[in-house]
Amino acid sequence: MSFIEAIILGIIQGLTEFLPVSSSGHLELAKFILGDNSLPQESLTFTVVLHFATALSTIVIFRKEIIEIFKGLFQFKWNEEFQFSLKIIISMIPAVCIGLFFEEELESFFGGQILLVGFMLIITALLLLFADRAKNTNKKVSFFNAFVIGVSQALAMMPGISRSGATISTSVLLGVDRTKAARFSFLMVVPLIFGKIGKDLIGGSISFQGDQMLTLGAGFIAAFVAGLFACSWMISLVKKSKLWYFSLYCFIVGVIAITVTLMNN
């Protein structure tokens, strides 16, 4: 992977992590178009680094909320901040279970499975379309909502299903306020990403070689900067109920991915 390709992939990750079009799916499509022949493990390492960059951009955007959450969590009082922290933990359970028990199966999906990406993008398109037509409310995320949203997040570990699209759509369909849904969606993934990176580093499933550091660094910076922009933009778009634009986009890209794959077989 070249320096320029790493920057391109970083920008794609930064934008698509927050926009509901599947960052993992777009990374696989971009690698296919760029002719990236990385082994699944190398590909996964690069993907993890880019997700770490977007997690940091989330922390920057929501730094005040995160500080309040930590304050509430360690005060051990049944206040709004403490309850919100518990909801974040509950939302993590499904994804943690999938990551622990189906890690090898999950990694196999990140090796240029373009046909799978195409079908998953169409599923994302349908979720966004249904959510865009849902009525807006002032409802907060409940404990039950948090678990159901967590199941959506676990399913979104498949390349092609947008994590933000799936979690925000699920929240809205459950009747949660759109702004609160976006906020919860972006915050719930941060501990998972850091936990995943820590687990992979300790377990040795990802490694950083000297000749990769320049490209990894370029991709990291590009993803971080693009993520800062996309996170703020996505919150504004969710408020204005503009998800159907992304639904149409995901459907078109999904159909193209399926068509190209079938024509090449």
Image (spheres, helix red, strand yellow):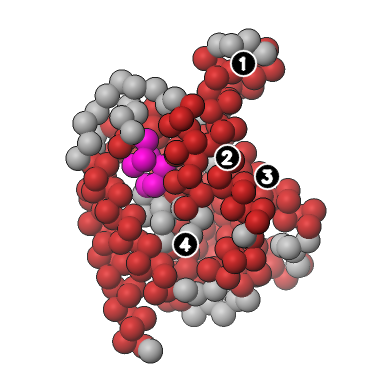
For badge 4, the amino acid type reads: Pro
Q: In the image, what residue occupies the spot 39% across and 27% down?
A: 180
Marked residue nearer the N-terminal end (2 or 3): 2
Marked residue nearer the N-terminal end (4 or 1): 1
Which label was assigned to residue 92?
2
Which label was assigned to residue 195?
3
Determine whether label 1 and label 2 are within 8 Å by CB. Answer: no
- Secondary structure mostly seen in magenta is helix
Instruction: Judge the density around disc 1: few (<14), some (14-19), many (≥20) Cα neighbours within 10 Å.
Output: some
For badge 1, the amino acid type reads: Gly
Q: Taking 247 as reference, is 28 above or below it?
A: below
Marked residue nearer the N-terminal end (4 or 3): 4
Which label was assigned to residue 72?
1
Q: In the image, what residue occupies the spot 35% across and 61% down?
A: 121
Marked residue nearer the N-terminal end (1 or 2): 1
Q: Is residue 52 magenta?
A: no
Determine whether label 2 and label 3 are within 8 Å by CB. Answer: no
Magenta region, residue range: 164-171
C-alpha span from label 2 to label 3: 10 Å
C-alpha span from label 4 to label 3: 19 Å
Between 152 and 184, the residue placed more toward the observer is 152
Question: Which residue is label 4 attached to?
Answer: 159
- Side of 87 where 265 appears, left or right: left
Q: Position of residue 190 (x, y in %)?
A: 58, 39
